[in-house]
Image: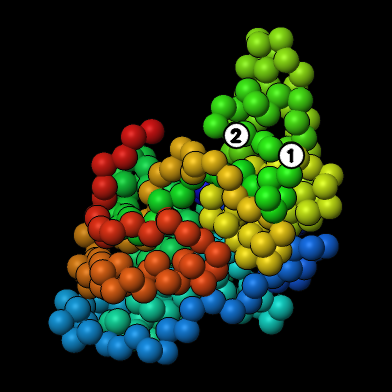
Amino acid sequence: MRTNPTRIIAAIAALGLAAGLSACTNANDLATGSAKAKTQGYDVSSITKQDNIAALLPAGALGADGRLDIGAATDYAPAEFLDANGKPIGYDADITKALGKVLGVEATMHSASFDSIIAKVGTEYDAGISSFSITNERMQNVDMIQYVRVGSQFNVAKGNPKGLDVSDHLNLCGKVVGVQTGTAQADALEADNQSCAAAGQSAIDIRSYDKQAEATSALVGSTLDATYSDSTVAGYAVETTNGAVQTIGEVEDAAPQGVVLQKNSQAYAAIQAALQYLMDEGILTDILKSWGVEGAALSNATLNPAVSE
């Protein structure tokens, strides 16, 4: 989950990328061992303009060019990342195109460093769609429309051959678990090791990897007992390994993510209605499924929802 750049400082040093990296960078980065990039998502060509929703978009609300310009840190598979040709892909990229179809406008996703996007919403970008966790602090400065709910989840090898039970993290004591360097999941396992020590059990052997695909490949190769990542990333690993790994346990610490808009944006009603349309028609669910993500779609495109932190 993307809250701030602190979780990815080590990955930045290793990969030489801008602040905001929390997963893989592009299709080439993903092609590591057994984990290979998926580059084709949802075909939005069948989505048609909805005149009643497009009518909610005032003239000039999208600037002189009339284009829906979206800012995204395209380094976070499977939400938004780059293919081998430098083209933005992922479920957020497909959502961007789908919104354009519903509104009857051209929609373009622009690559940017994660921590620069919010400041440019309302000037350079009409909105930001980049796995933004909805927080009360953010909603003091921008409006946010929820669309997905993302948490943390474990992967194990297909069939869970080691019989791992993750319903209680104490069951991980003495196990070998892979994480991506600098993630919230890495921090969570470090905290779990304090519980292991208090219970008189062996520590979790936490293996950190620069790229999530490397951790997935290690899991397929039986180097690890499990991996721990964002729930969307866990689902994507199932997709990219053709089912050689599987998710287990419940999605933990799930929280909504949202589209970022300038406060009181003229475009908010149209974008909110377009998102709701994608939800009601099942298109949002289908987009997520096309990237190996199950169960993350929300049913209400609520503006500035109440969240706890």
The answer to whether any part of residue 24 appears in the image is: no
For image coordinates 68% across by 22% down, the residue present is 193
Quarter the C terminus occupies: top left
Q: Estimate how packed mark 1 is, as few (under 14), some (14 to 19) or many (20 or more) residues with alpha carbons within 10 Å.
A: few
Q: Position of residue 169 (x, y in %)?
A: 60, 27
Q: Residue at 76% of width from left, 25% of height from top?
A: 174
Q: Nearer the viewer, residue 113 or 84?
A: 84
The residue under the point 61% across, 43% down is: 154
Q: Out of 38 and 273, give the one closest to the viewer.
A: 38
Q: Residue type at mark 2?
A: Val
**Label 1's element?**
loop
Residue 162's disc number: 1
The residue at the point 54 percent across, 77 percent down is 41
Element carrying mark 2: loop
Q: Which residue does the numbered mark 2 point to in the structure image?
A: 166
Disc 2 vs disc 1: which is toward the camera? 1
